[in-house]
Image (cartoon, coloured by chain):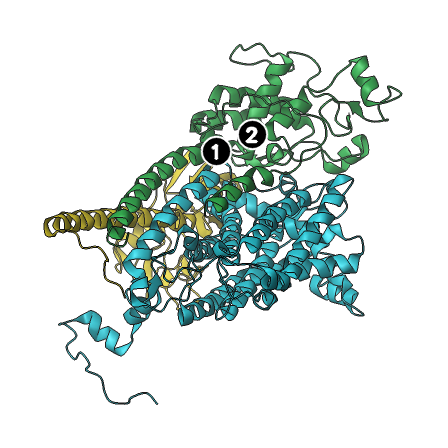
Amino acid sequence: MRMFVLLLGLLFPLAVAAGEGPAIAKQDWGFDGLHGQYDKATVYRGYQVFTQVCMACHSAKYVSHADLDRAGFTPEEIAALAKSMNLTTTDKLVSGLAPADAQEVYGKVPPDLSVITKARAGLADYTYAVLTGYSDDVEALAHAFPNSEVPAGAYFNTAFAGYAIAMPNPLPNADMVTYTDGTPATVPQMAHDVTVFLQWAAEPELIERKHLGVYVLLFLAIFTLLAYLTKKAIWRDVH
Amino acid sequence: MAKPSSKPTASASDVDADRRKFLVGTTAAVGAVGAACCAVPFVGSMAPSRDVAAQATVDINLSEIPEGEAKTYLWQGKPVFVWHRNAAQIAAAKAGDTTSTMDPEPDAKRVQKPEWLVVLGICTHLGCVPIRNDEVGGWRCPCHGSQFDVSGRVIHGPAGTNLHIPPYTFVDDNTLRIG
Amino acid sequence: MASLKPKAVEQNITRNPLKWFDDRLPLVSLINNSVGRNFPAPKNLNYMWNFGSLAGIALVIQILTGLFLAMHYKADVALAFDSVQHIMRNVQWGWLIRNLHMVGASFFFIVVYVHMARGLYYGSYKSPREVLWGIGVIIFLIMMATAFMGYVLPWGQMSYWGATVITNLLSVIPFVGDEVVVWIWGGYSVGDPTLTRFYALHFLLPFVIVGIVILHIWALHEHKSNNPTGLDLQDEKDFIPFHPYYTVKDIFGLGVYLIAFALMVFYAPDYLGHTDNYIPANPLVTPAHIVPEWYFLPFYAILRAIPIKELGVVAMFGSILILFVLPWLDSSRVRSARYRPLYRSLYWVFLLNFLVLGWVGSKPPEGIYVLIARFATAYYFLFFALLPVVARVEKTRKLPKTIDEA
């Protein structure tokens, strides 16, 4: 019996799939952990980066302004943001770049970003790592490519599998956007904010999920304790 | 089957029985509450989803309806008749206040602006979509022959009540929002 | 022939409605006899015996959540991925129901694996419970088929390529293999017809499982549960009624199970999944590293351990089918591993070896991993091959006379 429990405990760490490719640094995210949340101000800054930078090429075809209510935006704020982009609140965030044009210009259709943070090993850390992974470091480049030459049409990125990414650096310098809340728009700041936005886009239900989970676990703990005491009381005369 | 093997003293077993009863009752009650709560997500999942709920309103450009004509729009999956009534039709509707007696209701109560009649295009009999018919003044239902006048009031059965009026507002002079 | 003499039948519906009804349709008696006061269970069952009823509950959770998902899912290659996102984003509570179904599948397998490991340890497959065991293996097989087809439905990259790889296994069938694969696909590759039929079968098979579970329980009732000592229990005092003793114990076990389940559902729903499945299926690009869901990994490792395709497929299916003949391979008269020192050692190595197979199945098939997989596969089969020998040479420990003595 004890051995079974031990083996079951072994099973979980073993279940973790093998990770390959460049090491992805772990970041501290507000949405991690039992009390994970989306900070509305961060989501809004990320929204600015996404709509002003990413959306030039990428879509988030499952996401509309109306969904922002799940990050704490009021109906008035949502209506105003949608209007400023000439969209209705239920229009999806679709890039103006047609897939066929992208294929011609970049040789590749930029992936939809609705669930990008769930679609790559490393999750949100990976998104952040790629956004901040562009480098001019000659030594790193020489380490990645023997002749220090990135394949044609690609860009050197320390976080991308194979170190050569088709996407040009979307955040090459600070102040790609002007944050309305006055936060200095450094590259790490923009990368962080847009990653939070993309995580929100991928899992808008996260706040509800983690919030409900606390109550469910609390209930189950009480129920299980009661069931245990009942079990002991009923089994008294057998043992 | 075996009865309890050890025999506790009488008083101790009384205490045990009470305690046991209490625990069984409490656990069952808590479990029942939990089970009932489990129904919430399943029942809720069948209600209108977020995207359906978000499309609960529809905006209509009124300039596309010529005077005297009616057009049909889809709102929440249901047809809505929007009739741009001319002076003669408004007068006929007013006159109908006294003659449409099956479900009497003055035209003034059925419209926000006399030149715009907005009614749900669903026969109050069994849910078919009535067809415009100038002879009866308003609409005639193809299913069972119910007739409605220029104000959407029933003037001939089997329907017994007037065409329903959806909630609507005039956002501006040119835009009607249903829902 | 049974007596045809009329029984005393309650005539007044208001005096005792329950008895009145039971006299006409003995539903209450049926429940009492199956999992109630009239079902005697050995009094010494440990917590490993909780996993049978847990498996039943896991099945019910899958059917219930699956039914409600089916109300929103669309089995069409152009819409499947979108409809899953629709469930996650728009359907009220959709994210919860899908997480329950997704994590529920993994937990179902955990429970069933423990249930099987318990049977293997305490010799629950031995006479007179061979049929009970065999029905269990059938349930396991149908469960695997159901889970495999369910994983295809979200139509992500892993869905598509998993379906491609697994259906291609059937091409080893002599003479008609290729035709069979095309027939299964309903086309010349995994596509829309495949997805639609997988959906239909994924909906049907759980109910087939329910039917076979009823047979499983029926067979269980014929000779009652085995117990940790493996002794044949004759004495009435060795038994206690299933209700309330094991109902309350199962409810407590269920509580513990649900806590672990809820932790995953609410805080790590994708932990056991694969990120590639959030990329829509693309028939032109295979992901760099395809792995099946974790619960298939040990068998996947056996498949890849053998360099000859046909032999690998045979070994993989054989590794499960061999369980059918286990009751005859193991001819020892002693059931429980408690009293079988040699078997017990081999058993623990077997279980550990099974985990190693699972681990190596998640690794790329190259270098040292291939070697480990081959050794582990060899031991997997060696274990079964050794059983007849073990039965002959093993010096078993002295069996207790009764379970109270144990």
Q: Residues within 10 Å of mark 1 (few under 14, many from 20)?
A: many
- Residue C88, horizontal then vertical, whole percent: 51, 42
Name the amino acid type tagged 1: Leu
Residue C105 horizontal side relative to residue C371, left or right = left
Q: Could you tell me how far apart the alpha carbons at marks 1 and 2 are, in whole angstroms? A: 9 Å
Q: Nearer the viewer, residue C139 or A10?
A: A10
Q: Kindly state the secondary structure of the residue where label 1 is placed.
A: helix
Q: Nearer the viewer, residue A151 or C19?
A: C19
Residue A85 horizontal side relative to residue C242, left or right = right
- Residue C58, horizontal then vertical, whole percent: 45, 53
- Residue C264, horizontal then vertical, whole percent: 48, 40
Query: What is the number of callouts on the image?
Result: 2
Which residue in the protein does label 1 denote? A206
Question: In the rendered image of this protein, which colour is used for chain B?
Answer: yellow
Question: In the rendered image of this protein, which colour is used for chain A?
Answer: green
Q: Nearer the viewer, residue C350 or A194?
A: C350
Which residue in the protein does label 2 denote? A199
Q: What chain does badge 2 belong to?
A: A
- Residue C36, horizontal then vertical, whole percent: 30, 64
Residue C233, above or below B173: below
Residue C146, above or below A28: below
Picture quarter containing residue C22? Answer: bottom left
Question: In the rendered image of this protein, which colour is used for chain C?
Answer: cyan
Name the mark on residue C229: none
Which residue lies most toward the right here?
A: A147
Q: Kindly state the secondary structure of the residue where label 2 is placed.
A: helix
Q: Is residue C26 visible?
A: yes
Q: Are marks 1 and 2 in contact (CB under 8 Å)?
A: yes
Q: Is residue C286 visible?
A: no
Q: Nearer the viewer, residue C308 or A196?
A: C308
Name the amino acid type tagged 2: Gln
* Residues at discs 1 and 2 both on one chain: yes
